[in-house]
């Protein structure tokens, strides 16, 4: 019984460490909105820096308004209609 409790405690500590590390490395947040072929969408992303957060949010917004590789590549090249980032 004691071994099981120790195993659970170690597992919980590991999970907590992974979550802490993941959350502490996301210091920037961006919300990006795009409009593509009459459709619009917004997406929010967190990352280590503003540039990464902006790219991830832009990609997330494009994934909501495109259907296929060609449209996704086109959408990735268009400017955002709204950009809100905080470090």
Image (cartoon, rainbow, N blue to C red):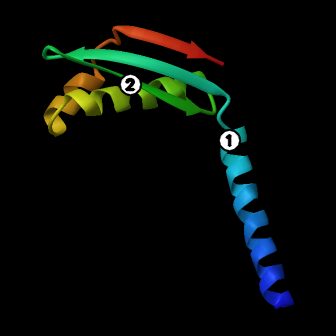
Local packing at callout 2 (Cα closer than 10 Å; few below 14, some 14-19, many 20+) is: many
Q: Picture coordinates of residue 1 (x, y %)?
A: 82, 91
Q: Which residue is mark 2?
A: 58
- CA separation in Å, label 1 and label 2: 21 Å
Please report the residue visible at 38 percent of the width from the left and 25 percent of the height from the top.
58
Give the residue furthest to the front. Answer: 1
Quickly name the residue at label 1.
23
In this orientation, which residue lies closer to the viewer: 36 or 40? 40
| 7 lies left or right of 43 | right
In the rendered structure, the answer to whether residue 9 lies left or right of residue 52 reads right
Residue 73 position, x and y percent, is 23, 30
Around disc 1, counting alpha carbons within 10 Å, would you say few (fewer than 14), some (14 to 19), or many (20 or more)? few
Q: Position of residue 63 (x, y in %)?
A: 28, 33
Image location (x, y in percent) of residue 78: 27, 15
User: What secondary structure is found at the residue carrying circle 1?
Assistant: helix
Q: At x 22% / y 32%, what residue is drawn?
A: 72
Query: Which residue sits at x=62%, y=25%?
Result: 28
In the rendered image, which quarter is residue 47 located in?
A: top right
Farthest residue, direction right: 2
Residue 70 occupies quadrant: top left
Q: Which mark is nearer the camera, 1 or 2?
A: 1
Give 65 or 58, whichever is nearer the viewer.
65
Q: Is residue 23 left or right of residue 10?
A: left
Q: If the image is split into quadrants, where does the C terminus sit?
A: top right
Question: Are dots 1 and 2 in contact, CB under 8 Å?
Answer: no
Secondary structure type for disc 2: helix
Numbered label tally: 2
Q: Nearer the viewer, residue 5 or 43?
A: 5
Q: Residue at x 26, y 31 (%)?
A: 64
Identify the mark nearer the N-term, 1 or 2.
1
Q: Nearer the viewer, residue 43 or 77?
A: 43
């Amino acid at each position: 019984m004691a071994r099981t409790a120790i195993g659970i405690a170690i597992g919980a500590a590991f999970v907590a460490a992974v979550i802490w590390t993941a959350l502490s490395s996301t210091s920037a947040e961006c919300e990006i909105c795009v409009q593509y072929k009459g459709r619009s969408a917004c997406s929010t992303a967190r990352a280590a820096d503003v540039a990464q957060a902006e790219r991830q949010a832009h990609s997330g917004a494009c994934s909501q308004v495109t259907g296929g590789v060609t449209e996704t590549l086109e959408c990735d090249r268009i400017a955002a209609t709204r950009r809100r980032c905080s470090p």
